[in-house]
Image (spheres, helix red, strand yellow):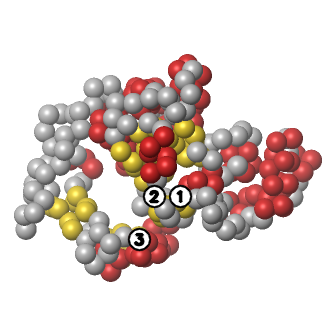
Amino acid sequence: MKCSESSRRFRKNSDRYEIYDIDPPHMEVGRGSTPQGLPRIPVKTITLDTFDNYSENIRRADALRYFVLYEYGGIYADLDMESLKSLNPLIMKYSCFVGQEPYEHPILDSNFEHLVINAIMGCRKNHPFMLKVMKSLPDFSHMWNVLDSTGPHFLTLNYRQYVRDANVSPDDKDGVYLAPAEYFFPTIDPAKFFWMRTQCGRPHKLTSIQKDACKSLKIKGIKRQISSISFATHHWIHTYLDLSITLKGPVDIHTVVPQVKIYKQNMMPGQK
């Protein structure tokens, strides 16, 4: 089992990982059987054809996180999320919470505010928002870009529709809390530095909210410190992009997390 070189930075926060070594095509989802030792994830609201026919594994990974949160509840976080302090204040108050990218990201990219990102999410079991997200997957499976089919753009649209139609407060049992960007995403993605500087360098082509975003960049700076109110921070590794993996190269997982436990397919946890 190998992982990206970039994962080395998380060693101080990663005392123990449990990795299920299963090829995605062999993952049984909702078919009535799974590799031994793994919980079956019943999927009642999405056709298996949608899942099987995704063109990239990142789309399956996106879909699975929605399935797991709906069926079991809990907190999902990408491996490039670094925990800074307990999430208990959020867990105790909200039955479902999601994060959003930094203010400037969606404005300078696509001229809209509040991009909901699926790198970290927490929801109670059987939350109606996650049910809506799952039901929407087939309708967006044809989208060319992963951001639109299963990722942040897809999730943002579902969040907006749910908030509009549900008409409940964020702290209601069926509500969804959109956390400030500073809670989970206090820093700007370094991959966007050049693009943002380019955008802000031609103000005559910008909309009014894009000009405001450029003012924010000038005041706050593009390279930011983690806020004191942050529960976590995101390192913007983008490991799903083949280019980043090719440039950095793989390393053995044991060099990153020496105590890693790896479960081979058809092996129960605890067996060797």
What residue does disc 1 label?
Answer: 231
Label located before the other in sequence (1 or 3)? 3
For this rendering, which residue is in front, 103 or 263?
103
Mark 3: few, some, or many residues within 10 Å (few <14, many ≥20)?
few
What residue does disc 3 label?
Answer: 13
Q: CA distance from mark 1 to mark 2?
A: 7 Å
Q: Which amino acid does the dot numbered 1 rest on?
A: Phe
Q: Furthest-right residue in view?
A: 204
Q: Disc 2 on helix, strand or loop? A: loop
Q: Residue at x 29, y 65 (%)?
A: 17
Q: Disc 1 on helix, strand or loop? A: loop
Q: Residue at x 27, y 31 (%)?
A: 43
Residues tagged 1 and 2 counted as in contact (Cβ below 8 A): yes
Mark 2: few, some, or many residues within 10 Å (few <14, many ≥20)?
few
1 or 2: mark nearer the eye: 2
Image disc number at residue 86 = 2
Residues tagged 2 and 3 counted as in contact (Cβ below 8 A): no
For this rendering, which residue is in front, 61 or 98?
98
Q: Disc 3 on helix, strand or loop? A: helix
2 or 3: mark nearer the eye: 2
Q: Which amino acid does the dot numbered 2 rest on?
A: Ser
Q: Which amino acid does the dot numbered 3 rest on?
A: Asn
For this rendering, which residue is in front, 56 or 150?
150
Q: Residue at x 32, y 80 (%)?
A: 255
For this rendering, which residue is in front, 148 or 247?
148
Res 240 → quadrant = bottom left
